[in-house]
Amino acid sequence: MNFLNKLLLRLVLMPALLYKKLGADPRQLRLILTAKLMMDDRRPNMYHYTRRKTEKAISGSTLGTMFFSLLFGLFFLYGFMISDERITQLTIYFSIYIVILSTTLISDFTSVLMDVRDNYIILPKPVNDKTFVLCRLLHIFIHLLKLVIPMSLPAVVYMFIQQGPGASLVFSFILLFCTVFTIFLINAVYLIILKVSTPAKFQAIISYVQIFIAIFMYVGYQLVPRLANKIMLTGYTISGKPWAWLLPSYWFAGGWQFFYSFNIRYATGGLLSLIVPPLTLWIVVKYFAPSFNQKLSQLSAGNEEGIKKKRGSGSSFWALVKQKLAALSTGRGEERMSFLLTWDLTSRSKDFKLKVYPSFGYLLVYAVMLFFNNKITLEELRLGTSGSKLTVLSVTYICTFIVAMALEQIQYSDKFRASWFYYTTPIRKPGLILAGSLKATMIKFVAPACLVILIAGLAIIGVQVVPNLLLGFCNVWLSCLIIAVLTVRALPFSAFQHNKKKAGAIIRSLMSMLIPLFLGVLQFFVYHSVWAVLLCCCLSVIASWLLLDYLKNKSWQQLAVAYNE
Amino acid sequence: MDHTSMQPAIVIENLRKNYGTKQVLKGVNLEIFPGQIIGYIGPNGAGKSTTVKILCGLINDYEGTVTVNGTDLKQEPIRVKSMIGYVPELAELYEVLTPREFLELMGQLYNVPDAVLAMRITGLMEAFGLGSNLDQRMDTFSKGMRQKVLIASGILHNPDILILDEPLSGLDANSVIIIKELISSLAREGKTIFYCSHMMDVVEKVSDRIVLINEGAVIANGTFEELQHQLGSNSLEKIFSSLTATESPSAKAHQMINLLENKTVST
């Protein structure tokens, strides 16, 4: 255990006598907390999730978490640079603080909080309930300290330098209240999720929170500098805007101001920021905690009766759509099996979603940014200037990267051992499996994107863009096929994802990125001649047809795959 | 064995438990004496795990009384828990810890003195052939290895009562022999063993007394010989099936064969 954990543990266990008075056993508290902190240190945290899996055992993730919190804290300082006015600065700061702290806590700590194993491992031991509950609370408290201290440190220091110790002290005090309020928010989120869904589904929801964080970060990275410029230029201020009262961060900002200048607005803010957090804490203790504990114990009792069964996709509308699409696009047997497997697993595997969905988000953000960055007018789009041609083509060809990423990831799975059935069933052409999987990916992820692009194109530019979009889509399909033929080396969900990629694989995937680029450039030159575009469409379709046939006919020898033990 | 002079180790009286409106235990009565190995069997969903969870203190909102060595479970759960060793069914442990770390935590929670604890941990793990794995994290362990660690964690504090839930799952033949041997020796020393399993042949051989539970109530309770005599079947498997199966298993098997051979199913 590292020194930080030891220090925090000692700090938290200082009031041992008080704990004893409360009915807990300080010795057991120390034992369990020590083990818990040790485990925290070895558990992958949210900064590990989106990365590739490492084979090395994780240790010292506490320090990692704290380091990242510190980085976050430094990033929050940006709030102070955006505006000249303190109240606007503080509102921005507190907003970011609340959002980041709550999402980090939810995504990072839920698994710890929901650890059902405690009930099997700790509860049968002679540990009394009070020790058990207190242990949980202290564990959460330590985790909170690890996040909050480094996260708020930069701003507290900044305040100290800018306005002296008093300001910094008041600021820390307000931050404490802000943290309490954030805890209330998290509790509310937990409770709502548990109300509308089952504990079993919780993990799935948490992974969406993680995906959201990743996308949010990217948007922030892209947008904040632009917004900041705008605010700076226009001298935007938040004070006096009536909607600002809806933001709790505005109250906290007012609370801080209140210590410096008396003003009825600040006083209201100050009052709210002092009254609301204790009130919410009371709500948490009085109402949320008991019902939360009840839900948790339901979860832990492990009684299947109490938990609703997870629905398969039996007869719902989407299941029908899936079946229809499969029947339309694939032949019976291996190909259709693989289509359905890919379709289902890509929406149910947490691993896949965590690795691929954020990149979809990035692409979407990127596509939107493309539009706004190039500053193309509608008029130009209709006329088809070279700038607008570029925009249309980039937005269309970006779809290829969706497939490239999904195809790469579909090969891997945590449960790669479950792929034994490919090797025990009489499959003659594994190429059919690759084809089915590719089709599922295309229809599930690319077709909707193409549809959106088509509708947007029709609405913004008009019918004249259709041939070019059509060629674009054909070429996307062709590039995806080429990528699949070149890069896919394993059957769907059958390989273990290693950290290191072989040099050959990297070159292949880089090369495959050049294909859509090349096709795009070609299209750029024929863009204005409808006949040339349509001719290219035909060529592209013929090429895809031949390639698909080649892919389908790939034999076991060509694939050279083997069951992974 | 004559138990009249002895105080029972576990007394369960009129034990009831509901999940919502569903009654899982409908008044279970049991008396178990020291030195006995009880084979606790029943079909899936019969209330077996619920009984075990109540005995271990995992569930405490039950009706009826459970007394362990004269102590009421509801009144003094901590005292009762320190007399019991529990090996859970699913290999539930903290995988990121090493066996040494995990077992130290378990032993210390039972207040085993440090020196004794260290000796027992190395001794037990070596006996299980895991001496060289003591300081490896358990996330790489096979199911059998985890099971061995769990069994060690159940007997670490030398409990009077040992509750085993499917303890042999994932173990190789040699380890199975060790565990069976261990169970009989513990019973000879006067420990009480509560053995839950679906493996009828093991239960038949290991247990002194067999308790069969179905739909929340005890439907058979006696030595294997008594049950054989009462029901006229010679294997526990047959006895089990005759008491709990609603349809005859051979008819079901026959149905399946018909399905595979595309014959119409006649019932």
Image (tube, coloured by chain):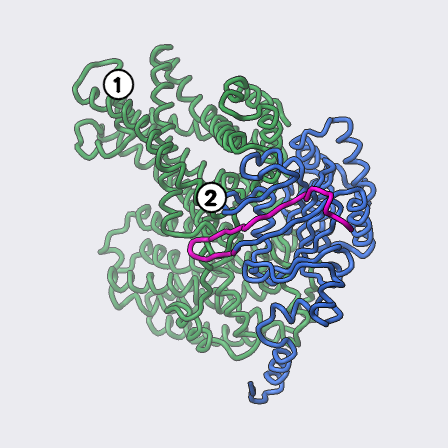
Whether the magenta-drawn stretch holds residue B6 is answered as yes
List the single residue furthest toward the front: B4
Q: Residue at x 24, y 65 (%)?
A: A462
- Subunit that carries the residue with mark 1: A
Query: Where does the magenta region start and end?
Result: B1-26
Look at chain B in the picture and name its colour: blue
Q: Whole-percent x and y of residue A348?
A: 49, 58
- Nearest to N terminus: mark 2 or mark 1: 1
The answer to which of A450 and A537 lies nearer the viewer is A450
Rendered residue at 42%/72% (across/down) = A536
- Label 1 amino acid? Gln
Residue designated by label 2? A296
Asked if residue A305 is among those painted magenta in the image, a careful observer would answer no
Give the chain letter at badge 2. A
Is A530 positioned to the left or the right of B142 in the image? Answer: left
Relative to A468, say whether A136 is above or below: above
In the rendering, at what x and y percent does residue A73 appear? 43, 27
At mark 1, the secondary structure is helix
Dot 2: element: helix
- Residue placed under numbered mark 1 in the picture: A257
Query: Residue type at mark 2?
Result: Leu
Q: Colour of chain A?
A: green
